[in-house]
Image: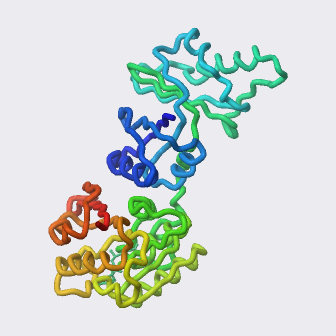
Amino acid sequence: MQYLFELSGENPELALEELAALFYPSKFVLIKKFDNFVILESSLSEIKVKELAERSAFLHSAAFLVTKLKSLSLNELGNVKWAFVKIPFCVRAIDLTGNQMSMLEARLAGPIYDYFVQKKDGEIPLVSMEKPKTTVLFVITNKEIYVTKMLWKVSKGRFKKREPMKKPAFHPTTLKPKLARLLVNLSRAKKGYILLDPFCGTGSILIEAAILGCKPIGVDFDAIMIKGSRKNTAFYNVKARLMEGDATKLTKILKPNSVDAIATDPPYGRSTRIGAKNINVLYKDFMSSAHKILKKKKFVALLYPDSINAKKLMNKKQWKIIFETSMFVHGGLTRKFLILQKR
Ligand SMILES: C[S@@+](CC[C@H](N)C(=O)[O-])C[C@H]1O[C@@H](n2cnc3c(N)ncnc32)[C@H](O)[C@@H]1O
């Protein structure tokens, strides 16, 4: 089966890696990439793909690819097997050609409407823009037209309630919920997984992990931060195990090979206290400590400033690099995403 995804324009490379992480351990074949869209071949069902997309942070939409057309002629549109459409339906079109056609969506709805009229089995071909049972999404490029069945579409403001300023315990280092969600997904954490954030601060990653059905554990060596995490998790009515502890000595508080995923944004070494001789020692000792408590073949998703060379600080015999990329934040800060797998 083929699926079409619209990736966030903010960082399509990260969005594609999030897709790979969401699909994991299942794999897909990348068939095509254009603008912010990708077409993937996968054996996963439509329901499963919809579920994965709903969890995402950096996807805009997911759709099942029904067919490809060469043109929007009435003949080609009339030959599409519209039986997948449930009424009431609606039509959406994304035109990437630049030749904006007027009333495009209404025109494209015509052949679908006709299909139901010709069926003459009593179904009235209703259209509903608000509550359609099927949304037919056309993505129009200069070469091909993709006819798809929309499975999921991002809703604006879905993270609004959990923005840092809305949290009862706020700290300048509090991570935005969208990035926290991304990190959880990049760590390949699934429902029921024990996910550790060893530098949990006020708990943004823990909250997203709990919402996604993980069992989060938060560690921070600052008692005030742990108190903040307690307040915030209670406010959003989610559960997390919280512990005061040192991320460079995790075996003191956690059993070896007991954690399924690690997602974290360690200190940047600017204003926060770090509990180590310097920032490099902190990262080095944390990574060797994390290696002990993480299960074999499981993943760590890290977010940190690009002034830190985390790759140089880790033991390459212990970790395999899965993915890395940078994200510009502002003049003084570029963040790095790094995903590692325990060997
Ligand atoms: C960048 S902040 C994390 C922010 C967090 N993601 C949030 O959304 O609130 C880094 C945290 O690491 C904690 N920290 C610093 N050194 C630590 C260490 N050695 N062990 C555990 N926590 C430490 C700091 O107290 C701080 O809360």
- On the image, the x and y values in percent for residue 252 come to 35, 90
Ligand 1 in which quarter: bottom left
Residue displayed at 44% across by 85% down: 226
Is 1 in front, or is 129?
Answer: 1
Quadrant in the picture for residue 338: bottom left
- On the image, the x and y values in percent for residue 91 come to 61, 29
Q: Could you tell whether 294 is left or right of 149 in the image?
A: left
Residue 315 can be seen, yes or no: yes
Answer above or below: position of 28 versus 190.
above
Is 334 in front, or is 56?
Answer: 56
Is 81 in front, or is 25?
Answer: 25
Quadrant in the picture for residue 113: top right
- On the image, the x and y values in percent for residue 174 come to 39, 72
Residue displayed at 48% across by 14% down: 71
Q: Could you tell whether 25 is left or right of 246 in the image?
A: right
Q: Could you tell whether 145 is left or right of 88 in the image?
A: left
